[in-house]
Image (cartoon, rainbow, N blue to C red):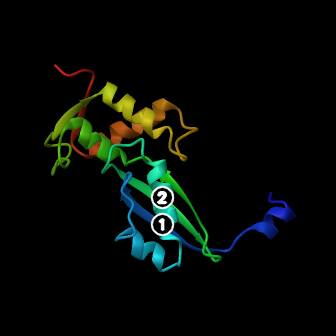
């Protein structure tokens, strides 16, 4: 239950913006510029802060970012690690998944790959309280739906 002080200090939200931006490469150009510009948000402040938060990732790693724009032209944002499918494609060394998952195997990954991806995903705000085993099972399900076979270890 929110206290009276919290209710009075809440800022009215004007929009929630979801973008996928390469790590360390946020620029005022599209797609960032037009998305934030229409809500009159400070583009350079976002770009500098985003690039600082994502500097530990390799350049061109696609990062999901959710920006909450407030009516007073201020904003907050959360950065999530890349999608599981992106990590699986990198680990398997392929450009895209199978055209016929369940029938045609696009590639294989090991359980060690799955475990490493799960450790990275556990740092996400929505996965931080999930057990590692549950995250691994979810990743294996994603791999199966992409036509990537998960094996104990590569022969």
Vertical placement of residue 80 versus 132, above or below: below
x, y percent for residue 34 = 40, 76
At a point 46% along the width and 30% down the height, the residue shown is 133
Vertical placement of 43 versus 121: above or below? below
Residue 63, placed above or below residue 31: above
Q: From the image, tell me which residue sits under label 2.
A: 48
Q: Position of residue 22 (x, y in %)?
A: 35, 55
Q: Marks 1/2: CA distance?
A: 6 Å
Q: Residue at x 38, y 48 (%)?
A: 82
Q: Secondary structure at mark 1?
A: helix
How crowded is the residue under tag 1: few (<14 C-alpha within 10 Å), some, or many (20+)? Answer: few
* Disc 2 secondary structure class: helix
Which label was assigned to residue 155? Answer: none
- Residue 79 appears at what percent x and percent y? 48, 52
Name the residue carrying label 1. Answer: 44
Residue situated furthest right in the rendering:
4
Say whether marks 1 and 2 touch (CB < 8 Å): yes
Q: Farthest left residue?
A: 104
Q: Quadrant of the N terminus?
A: bottom right
Q: How many labels sit on residues?
A: 2
């Amino acid at each position: 239950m929110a206290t009276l002080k919290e209710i009075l200090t809440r800022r009215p939200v004007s929009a929630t913006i979801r973008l996928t931006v390469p790590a360390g490469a946020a620029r005022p150009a599209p797609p960032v510029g037009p998305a934030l510009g229409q809500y009159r948000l400070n583009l350079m402040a976002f770009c500098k802060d985003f690039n600082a938060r994502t500097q530990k990732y390799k350049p061109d790693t696609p990062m999901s970012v959710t920006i909450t724009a407030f009516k007073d032209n201020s904003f907050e944002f959360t950065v999530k690690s890349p999608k599981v499918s992106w990590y699986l494609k990198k680990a398997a060394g392929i450009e895209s998944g199978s055209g016929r998952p369940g029938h045609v195997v696009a590639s294989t990954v090991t359980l060690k790959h799955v475990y490493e991806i799960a450790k990275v995903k556990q740092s996400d705000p929505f996965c931080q309280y999930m057990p590692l085993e549950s995250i691994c099972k979810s990743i294996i399900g994603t791999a199966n739906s992409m036509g990537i076979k998960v094996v104990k270890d590569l022969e």
